[in-house]
Amino acid sequence: MEMIGPEINIIMGTVFSVLLSIIAYFLKQLHTDFKKVACELQNVQNTVIVNKTQIDGVQELLHQKIDFIERRLSIFEDSKR
């Protein structure tokens, strides 16, 4: 009977160690995934900033063209009077 106790302790210790190793592995994988997500989020933010800058530039160019056409139209109307 005395031999059963130490054997159970060894088996339980081994099982506990294996389970902790598995948990540590998955936590490491989770940490790696979070790092990748953070990096991808930064890339998305940079892309959004670039796109916003491009849209602002195109919008400004469009406003300039509209102003130019309005000035030309006003000059044309003035010359017709």
Image (cartoon, grey):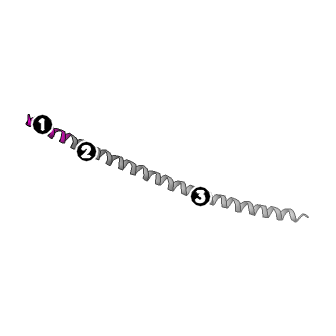
| Sequence-first disc among 1 and 2 | 2
Q: Which mark is residue 28?
A: 3
Q: Alpha carbon of mark 3 to alpha carbon of mark 2: how far?
A: 51 Å
Kind of residue sitting beneath label 3: Lys
Name the dominant secondary structure of the magenta segment.
helix
Q: Residue drawn at (50%, 56%), measured in percent from left and top?
A: 36
The reply to whether the magenta stretch includes residue 61 is no
Kind of residue sitting beneath label 1: Glu
Image: 67 above or below 14: above
Image: 54 above or below 13: above
Instruction: Give the SS element for disc 1.
Output: helix
Residue pointed to by mark 2: 62
Which image quadrant: the N terminus?
Answer: bottom right
Q: Is residue 15 left or right of residue 24?
A: right
Residue 60, position in %: x, y? 27, 43
Residue 27, position in %: x, y? 61, 56
The image quadrant of residue 72 is top left
Q: Which mark is residue 77?
A: 1
Q: Are marks 1 and 2 in contact (CB under 8 Å)?
A: no
Q: Is residue 43 left or right of residue 6?
A: left
Q: Are marks 3 and 2 in contact (CB under 8 Å)?
A: no
Q: Alpha carbon of mark 1 to alpha carbon of mark 3: how far?
A: 73 Å
